[in-house]
Image (cartoon, rainbow, N blue to C red):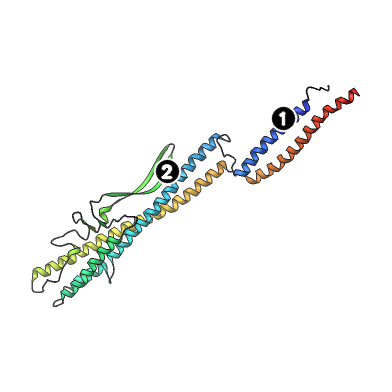
Amino acid sequence: MSSLLTNSTAMTALQTLRSVSSQLSTTQNRISTGQRVSTASDNAAYWSIATSMRADNAALSAVSDSLGLSAATVDTEYTALTTVVGDKNGGLTKLQALLVEAKTAGIDRVKIQSDVTQIQQQMKSTADAATFNGVNWLSATAATGTVDLVSSYSRVGGTPTVGKITLTIANYTLYNSAGNTGILDKVSGTDSVDTIDISALQDSVPADMTKLDGYIAQVTAAINTVASAAADLGAVKNRISTNTDFVKSLMDSVDRGIGQLVDADMNQESTRLAALQVQQQLGVQALSIANNSSQSILSLFR
């Protein structure tokens, strides 16, 4: 039956064209954004997971930045500590050698004290200069406590956990003007390493030689303590380096995971686009043919 009011063929062609146009719009959106899930309406579950993982990645990026800052701070303090330990040309090692040399009978201890004073001043200068971003653990002006270095971030379910490396600053403080509690300004006996003065010591006075022996022992103990502090910071430095590499690798893994969930397969989408464009063209032609079919009704009335 030919109907003038109802063109079922055109209706079918129009529905098909609408479906093809909708699919074409979806494909074009995927190609333009590079994602098959760009909004919650595309796939609510995947979109929610991807959004949470992107937030986790942002937190990991902040951890990476914090690790970089911590690494620079630790490296600054570590470098200063190793400089204070010194070698045969300076630092505590040179100071110890000078005090042992001062044990020699008849030696001019006034001249040796000149070198000792220079070393003491240089060590204090090194500690004062060990500052990064306003932070100095070696030269303090107040009571010291602990400091937390952010090292990691993880989330299990809805519970986030921020990992940290806790350091006791007193273990690294060489000078502390608040009570002289640093490694080098802490008084042991009558003097600290920072105030050792051998210029007035005499060979003929047994007490002076005993004091000199005490100075040597004091400096030796300081070398061991500062070396231990430097070794501890060296271990922290390695841990930060390892954590930095791990966080970067973890961020890459999360990015890959997000990509698996929401990224579009461009090979597949390009193939689908070509097919849908052809289907759209055929649909337009089919609709045109269906619309023209009603013109044949006129021939019945000629």
Q: For mark 1, what is the residue?
A: 15
User: What amino acid is at disc 2?
Assistant: Ser
- The answer to whether residue 7 is above or below residue 193 is above
Residue drawn 79% across the image and 33% down it? 288
Image quadrant where one finds the C terminus: top right
Q: Nearer the viewer, residue 261 or 228?
A: 261
Mark 1 vs mark 2: in front: 1
Q: Tell me, for residue 154, which label it has, or none.
A: 2
Look at the numbered disc 1 and give the secondary structure of its residue: helix
Residue drawn 37% across the image and 57% down it? 72
User: Which residue ends up furthest to the right in the rendered image?
Assistant: 302
Q: Nearer the viewer, residue 175 or 167?
A: 175
Image quadrant where one finds the N terminus: top right
| 210 relative position to 272: left or right | left
| 78 relative position to 251: left or right | left
Q: Residues within 10 Å of mark 1 (few under 14, many from 20)?
A: few
Residue 201 screen position, x and y as percent: 12, 71
Residue 63 screen position, x and y as percent: 41, 48
Dividing the picture into quadrants, the one containing residue 281 is: top right
- The answer to whether residue 87 is above or below residue 265 is below
Q: Earlier in the sequence, mark 1 or mark 2?
A: 1
| 110 relative position to 174: left or right | left
Dividing the picture into quadrants, the one containing residue 104 is: bottom left
